[in-house]
Amino acid sequence: MAQAAPRPGRMTRGDRTDRADRTPDVFSPRTHMIMTWSLTVLAGLVVGYWAAANRRSGGPITGWNLLFGFCTALAFVVLCVAVRIAASRMKRELHAITWAVFLGGTFGFVYAQTDKTALRSAVMAAAIGAVVFAVLFYRYYTHEDAEGHRVP
């Protein structure tokens, strides 16, 4: 049975390193930064529009309604950046809790703009936060080694 000989410069199965197991990153750090900011601003605009649409309850769009939507979008973007910076330095439990509180609170705020009660908004926010916590804790738990270091 014929077998191909290893070529110089290529890794063979026996001497693989940690780097060989990773998926190659084809985008530059600048591209990642641009996409991170673009998606954050886009998510802020979606949340701002959603909150403004809930607040007007199908009525006419007014200047105050637009201002409310843009202020909501700005607040979301600022808080999202703050959570991203703070949460990346935390252990997996606090990391997941921070994102769960932020996203649950965001949903609760948007839901509170409807004509529903504050209790119902709080219950919905807690439910969304619990789901986000479970998903993110599982993700962070499966992407760390025994000492708590993130594995790429």
Image (spheres, helix red, strand yellow):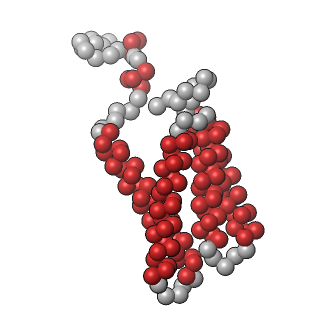
Left or right: residue 21 versus residue 142 is: left
Q: Position of residue 26 (x, y in %)?
A: 30, 38
Q: How many numbered marks are there?
A: 0
Q: Residue at x 62, y 66 (%)?
A: 109
User: On the image, which quarter does residue 1 sit in?
Assistant: top left
Q: Which residue lies at the image location 51% right of the left edge and 48% below the top edge?
A: 82
The residue at the point 40 percent across, 12 percent down is 14
Res 116 → quadrant: bottom right
**In the figure, 45 relative to 15: above or below?**
below
Tell me the residue at 41%/17% (across/down).
17
Looking at the image, is 143 positioned above or below residue 46?
A: above
> Which residue is at the far right?
119
Q: Position of residue 92 (x, y in %)?
A: 61, 36
Viewer-side residue, 135 vs 58: 58
* Extreme residue in the bottom direction: 60
Apparent side of residue 7 relative to residue 47 in the rendered image (left or right): left
**Residue 136 position within the rendered picture, expressed as x and y whole percent measured from the top left:** 60, 44
Q: Is residue 97 visible?
A: yes
Q: Position of residue 64 (x, y in %)?
A: 49, 80
Q: Is residue 46 visible?
A: no
Relative to 16, residue 61 above or below:
below
Left or right relative to 137: residue 17 = left
Residue reaching furthest to the left = 8
Question: Is 124 or 119 nearer to us in this picture?
Answer: 119
